[in-house]
Structures are given as structure tokens and as C-alpha cells.
Image: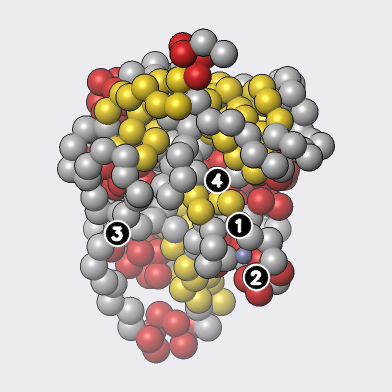
Amino acid sequence: MTAAEATMRALRLVEPGRPVEEQLVERPEPGPGEVLVRVGAAGICRSDAHYRAGTAPAGPLPLTLGHEVAGTVVETGPGTRRPGEGERVCLHYLDTCGTCPACASGREQFCDEATMLGKSRPGGWAEYVRVPARNAVPIPESTSFAHAAVMMCSTATSYHALRRARLEAGDRVAVFGAGGLGLSAVQLARAGGALEVLAVDVREPPLEIARQLGARPVQGGEDAAARIRAATGGRGVDVAVEVAGRRTTVRAALEALAPMGRVAVAGIFAGGVDVRPYAELIGREAELIGVSDHLLSEIPDLLEWEEHGVLRMDPVVRRTVPLEADAVNGALDRLEELEAEGRAVIVP
Ligand SMILES: [Zn+2]
Ligand SMILES: [Zn+2]
């Protein structure tokens, strides 16, 4: 192997608070039970902006970021049976032990030994990435790498949120935040049989996209809950999905609930939220539910829906950028300014 083949380009977080840097690093080799994947696409996520800013931990540094990844298997480690070389795959970002009590009970997101691609182990903002073979899920021929990559985080989280909220056919649903997660949540709620889906945002362009995807747009802001009540004949919603990551939208979601309603909170923000226990929870038997990550077992559902056109990723993935530090730092800046509409995806 020549020196050029043994290295690869990677975008790495060197120090929180500083731009990510392009570095030449050693190209990884797959160990037993692992595969080496040539990256076809890697999403740029709000979490990455948090890692860069130091508002969420990532490391040990320097670390190649990128937890939303799809590509082609180019090498398999000893004892790896599937997927095989040449297979197109998307990557589940949590590498869990598989045997601890959390893993054994199907709650793998609480595995104490879990590592996460692009957060605590080298991720996909590189030419190649090494992962356990079981994390590499084959994707349909018609599914693009960019679409598969973004399904690995925002779409999967949205799906997990709806499952946590126990969405049932005939439910009225409000989705707070019509960005990458929200536009997935709108479509998945419809696929799950929602009677109607209201998309709530303060920005006009994402609301228009949500409308095209079958949601009823509701202007966000101070009176959002009242507008939702008015739009539902005073009933309120059975399920609220909060992906905007704001104190005010969690409040609006609580206020917009029907009796027995459930709020699934997946948006992250610092600080607290006031809850009036009787009026908002006890008296309505309402639930406020946390949503953490998603499960490997949820990924095949998403791939199938995308293949059959129930889930459209083109409105979610808005643009691609090259594997270059300037372009990616620029995309992260836009996420921090909350300007971004939909997702930017790195295509090396
Ligand atoms: Zn993400
Ligand atoms: Zn475990």
C-alpha cells in the first residue's frame, strides 16, 4: 500500500469553540466483525454545532465528527459475514455492547458502554469510516446516500418520538418546529394514521414545505396554542412532538393538549420549563415524555417507507456541500443562527 492510500481526509474537531479542521489521518482498517465504509454522504446536524461550540461534549479530541452516514462497504474485517463488499449501507450511530441489562431489554440507548459515531468515536466527515458490521444496514437501490444519511438521525429521532408518544390512527398531531426533524415527523405522523397534522413554526418557508407534505401550517409564537385549539375545534391535539428545542414551544405543546394527550420532547435547550401539574397534567391525564435517540430496529421501517414514497426526503435534504472545512463550518454557522431550512449534507 502506498502512503497516499494509507491516509484519508477528515474534518475534525480539535478544540471546542474553534472551527473544525481538515486533517490527513490514517485510513482505518476493519477489525473482527467490522466493516470499512467509503462515505457516500454525511449529514450536518445541530448536534455537530453543539459539539463545535462546546455546548455538548464530544471527544476524545481531536475527533472526526459526523453521525449521519451512508456509503459503500469496501472492506470487511475477519469473521464479518454481512454486509459484504460493494453493498450500499447506512450506519446506525450507536455502537452498543449488546449484552448489558439495557441492551438485553431492548433499551440500547441506555447502554453504559455505548459509543457514538462522530461524538465519542471517529465519524463520517471523512473519506472512510469503520463500524461494527451490525451497525451497517443495507439500503434500497433507489435510496440515495444523502437521504439515507439524514434518516439516521433526524428522521429516526422523529420516528422514535412518535412511537414514544404512542401515536394511534385517528390522533390529531401537532409538530413544533418544521426543520429537518419536523418535516420528517409530519410525514411519519401521516404514515402512522394521524387524522390531521399541524405544523407549527415562526418561519414561513418551512411551513410552506410542511403544507406541501400534507400538514396544516400554524403560525408559531406567543399564541400558538390558542391557534391550535381554534384549528381543532377547541379539542387540542392528542400528540405533540416538540423538535424546535425551545422553552416556549414546550409550553405551547402542553397548552395545546387534549385530555389524555402526550407531548414528546426531543428538542434540546438549556434551562427549565414551568409546568402546572394540576391544570396541565393531572386534570387531563396528560403526559410529558422524553425522547432519547432511537433504536437500530426502527431503521428498517424508515428505509421501507422511503422506498415506497410514504416518506420523502427531498424536502428535508436541501443542499449538499463538499468535504471541505470552510463549507462545513459555514453550514454549522447557519445552524447556529437557526437560519438553516432543512439539512445540509456532505458529499465527499
Ligand atoms: Zn444528528
Ligand atoms: Zn449494552
Image location of residue 212, percent across then percent down: 52, 31
What residue appears at the point 53 percent right and 71 percent down from the top-left corner? Answer: 261
User: Label 1, label 2: how many angstroms apart (C-alpha)?
Assistant: 9 Å
173 to 149, vertically: above or below = below
What residue appears at the point 22 percent right and 45 percent down from the top-left corner? Answer: 16
N-terminal of the pair, mark 3 or mark 2, is: 2
The answer to which of 242 and 92 lies nearer the viewer is 92
- Mark 1 CB in 8 Å range of ligand 2? yes
User: Label 1, label 4: how many angstroms apart (C-alpha)?
Assistant: 10 Å
| Side (left or right) of 15 relative to 68 | left
Q: Quadrant of residue 222?
A: bottom left
The answer to which of 233 and 13 lies nearer the viewer is 13
- Mark 2 CB in 8 Å range of ligand 2? yes
User: Label 3, label 4: how many angstroms apart (C-alpha)?
Assistant: 22 Å
Query: For the residue marked with disc 1, what is the amino acid?
Result: Thr
Q: Which residue is mark 3?
A: 269
N-terminal of the pair, mark 3 or mark 1, is: 1
Q: CB atoms at circles 1 and 2 under 8 Å apart?
A: yes
Foreground label between 1 and 4? 1
Q: Which residue is mark 2?
A: 100
| Side (left or right) of 58 relative to 189 | left
Q: Is residue 91 in sight in this rendering?
A: no
SS at badge 2: loop
Q: Which residue is mark 4?
A: 93
What residue appears at the point 31 percent right and 44 percent down from the top-left corner? Answer: 61
Residue 110, numbered label: none
Query: For the residue marked with disc 3, what is the amino acid?
Result: Phe
Callout 1: 10 Å neighbours few (<14), some, many (20+)?
many
Query: For the residue marked with disc 2, what is the amino acid?
Result: Cys
Quadrant location, the N terminus: top right
